Image: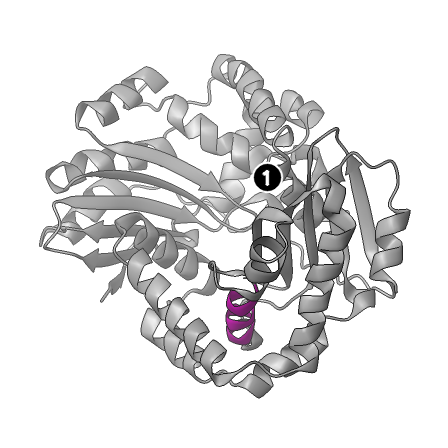
């Protein structure tokens, strides 16, 4: 399915050939993100992502880059997360060289003009305000702050306005020099790939400058003896909440059980939470569950956008469903359906060149290896009803709960009462 080659400068080349397509996604993934930051430069990973599009030695302006991309009918973007950042262009296969040229130039010779940095500060600040005005998104930032506390995993990926406004050119250069080493990157091509792809990669990426690989500070586990609740006051007609607890890291095999458990609880219109919260009671439009992992910790979460006047009833229904998972085994039918749903979703996602590029790039820079989809599904198939119940018993303990609320509430006392019953 994929080929891996390490180039002489330490950069890893990953190719996934799809000859029946006419397009290709070119992606560069970097083992860099907000958890590598100090408080003084919190938000620089995300800011740097913006600056790469502002001009390089070869393509000296944002307009030049965007005109080239638009001129071939391509699309490009980037994503910054806590542990990984990636940049991509999806284009017609015949323009793979131009896509490679643009991405490599952005990464190895960005200008970082102080004038552009100062101008972009206003853009970043407005982006942060936009997200904070969107409760369905901002509740996740607040939740991670609640669960992980005052350490890099708990800080906002975008940073704080005051810090963003203080960053200068030297900060960007120093940050890049600490993480953007070829050995800390993966170059991924997915789609209709020419036989000369290795030569293309060498032509544009072999000249990446040598840099360092700075390790992040390990997550410091916070001992939790009772449920934690945080209420962010906002005058809304809907209450957005995330209820979760500490989960498991990327290297813990329980993550496969967690994947099935989250599917049963909150994925699809036949999941337990969807049926109970939305279909039978009409308490929410959006409801779901998710199991996610970082390199040294993770979270199992339930998200809901609930009716304001029914928030307490909705909370009790969610908690009851979690407890039922711990007290009763799921049926054979439910378990089979969940496994088939996961298999089907992976099959659908695998038709996207962007999804494949992101998966392979992220997996390699974080794990230095790639777990194939078939290997994942083999482990999913081994999950038993007993595994699910045991994990539910381990996770769904009231003193382990973390509850983040955005809504028109002045205090958290009623929510604390519900969690601590």
Residue 396 makes an appearance in the image: yes
Of the pair 160 and 214, the residue shown nearer to us: 160
Determine the residue positioned at 80% across, 46% down: 230
* Image location (x, y in percent) of residue 62: 36, 19
- Image side of residue 197 versus residue 178, left or right: left
Which of the pair 109/398 is nearer the observer? 398
Q: Is residue 180 above or below residue 220?
A: above
Whether residue 168 appears in this view of the structure is no
Q: Which residues are magenta?
A: 256-265
At horizontal 83% and vertical 66% (from top left) the residue drawn is 399
**Image coordinates for residue 262, horizontal then vertical, percent:** 55, 66
Q: What is the chief secondary structure element of the magenta stretch? A: helix
Q: Is residue 50 above or below residue 238?
A: above
Q: In this image, 303 relative to 113: left or right? A: right
| Residue at 56 percent of width and 71 percent of height | 261
Q: Say which quadrant the C terminus sits in.
A: bottom right
Few, some or many C-alpha atoms within 10 Å of disc 1 (few <14, some 14-19, many ≥20)? few
Q: Is 261 inside the magenta-drawn segment?
A: yes
Mark 1 lies on residue: 137
């Amino acid at each position: 399915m994929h080929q891996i080659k390490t180039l002489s400068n330490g950069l890893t080349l990953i190719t996934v050939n799809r000859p029946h397509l006419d397009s290709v996604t070119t992606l560069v993934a970097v083992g860099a993100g907000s958890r590598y930051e100090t408080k003084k430069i919190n938000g620089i990973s995300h800011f740097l992502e913006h600056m790469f599009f502002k001009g390089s030695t070869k393509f000296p302006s944002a307009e030049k880059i965007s005109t080239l991309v638009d001129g071939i009918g391509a699309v490009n973007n980037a994503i910054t997360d806590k542990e990984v950042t990636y940049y991509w262009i999806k284009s017609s296969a015949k323009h793979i060289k131009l896509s490679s040229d643009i991405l490599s130039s952005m990464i190895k010779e960005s200008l970082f003009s102080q004038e552009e940095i100062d101008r972009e500060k206003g853009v970043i600040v407005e982006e942060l305000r936009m997200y904070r005005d969107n409760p369905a998104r901002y509740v996740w930032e607040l939740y991670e702050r609640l669960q992980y506390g005052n350490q890099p995993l708990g800080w906002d990926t975008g940073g704080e306005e005051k810090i963003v406004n203080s960053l200068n050119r030297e900060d960007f250069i120093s940050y890049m020099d600490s993480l953007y080493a070829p050995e800390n990157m993966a170059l991924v091509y997915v789609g209709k790939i020419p036989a000369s792809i290795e030569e293309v990669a060498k032509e544009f990426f072999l000249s990446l400058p040598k840099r360092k690989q700075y390790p992040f500070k390990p997550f410091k586990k916070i001992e939790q003896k009772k449920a934690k609740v945080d209420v962010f006051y906002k005058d809304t007609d809907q209450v957005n909440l995330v209820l979760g607890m500490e989960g498991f890291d990327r290297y813990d095999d329980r993550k496969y059980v967690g994947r099935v458990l989250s599917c049963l609880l909150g994925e699809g219109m036949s999941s337990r939470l969807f049926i109970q919260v939305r279909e039978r009671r009409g308490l929410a439009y959006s409801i779901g569950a998710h199991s996610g992992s970082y390199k040294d910790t993770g979270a199992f979460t339930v998200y809901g956008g609930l009716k304001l006047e029914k928030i307490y009833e909705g909370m009790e229904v969610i908690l009851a469903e979690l407890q039922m998972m711990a007290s009763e085994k799921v049926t054979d039918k439910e378990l089979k359906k969940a496994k088939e749903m996961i298999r089907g979703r992976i099959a659908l996602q695998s038709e996207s060149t962007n999804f494949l590029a992101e998966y392979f790039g992220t997996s390699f820079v974080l794990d230095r290896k790639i777990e194939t989809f078939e290997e994942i599904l083999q482990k999913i198939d081994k999950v038993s009803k007993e595994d699910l119940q045991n994990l539910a018993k381990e996770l769904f303990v009231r003193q382990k709960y973390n509850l983040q609320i955005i809504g028109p509430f002045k205090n958290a006392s009623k929510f604390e009462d519900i969690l601590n019953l």
